[in-house]
Amino acid sequence: MDNNVTRYNVQLYIYDLSRGMARSLSPIMLGKQLDGIWHTAIVTYGEEFFYGGEGISSCPPGGTMLGPPDTVVELGETEVTEEIFMEYLSSLGESTYRGDSYRLFEHNCNTFTNEVAQFMTGNSIPSHITDLPSEVLSTPFGQILRPILDSIHIAPPGGNVINRGRNA
């Protein structure tokens, strides 16, 4: 093993978009307890990277209008250089993670951070986050709300879009 290889820390920032309301209202509305409505971002190389209805964006850590994260999870370290990472994100922004590909339940910020976390560290993000859409949709109220929720595109203000990735 080469001890001269530079390693970079990779973190998962977790935000509760409901600001605690999911915890109190979900038992009444869904018949099951949800601890939050999760938005996640990857933090590495001194920047926060996330995906939403505008595509892949970045900002200083905690720099969106969501403010500081509710929780920070240490995902591990990577040997991937910032240059390779930015090329990887650019490629994702032109294909898989274009803004017009965003889908609240199937293809969202959490699917993005899970894919990036695996690329960078080999680790997945916590399953309670990736399982949230199926938890909601497994309830009768979730099925009723689905057509409305499918039209929602979350894009936390305050980020700089890396690659719009929209087809003209």
Image: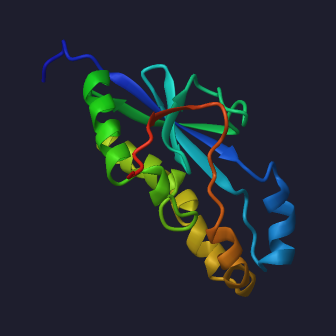
Q: Is residue 162 visible?
A: yes
Q: Residue at x 72, y 78 (%)?
A: 145
Q: Nearer the viewer, residue 20 or 157?
A: 157
Residue 16: percent from left, percent from top: 71, 48
Q: Residue furthest bottom?
A: 140
Q: Is residue 117 above or below residue 146?
A: above
| Quadrant for the N terminus in the image | top left
Q: Residue furthest top?
A: 4
Q: Residue furthest left?
A: 1
Q: Is residue 72 above or below residue 39?
A: above
Residue 118: percent from left, percent from top: 34, 47
Q: Nearer the viewer, residue 60 or 79?
A: 60
Query: Which quarter of the picture shows residue 79?
Result: top left
Left or right side of 10 for 90: left
Q: Residue at x 33, y 46 (%)?
A: 94
Q: How many marks?
A: 0
Left or right side of 118 for 150: right
Left or right side of 125 for 154: right
Q: Is residue 146 above or below residue 85?
A: below
Q: Residue at x 33, y 29 (%)?
A: 86
Query: Which quarter of the picture shows residue 15?
Result: top right
Q: Is residue 81 visible?
A: no
Residue 159: percent from left, percent from top: 59, 31
How was the colour assigned to the protein in this rendering?
A: rainbow
Q: Residue at x 51, y 31 (%)?
A: 58
Q: Nearer the viewer, residue 101 or 17?
A: 101
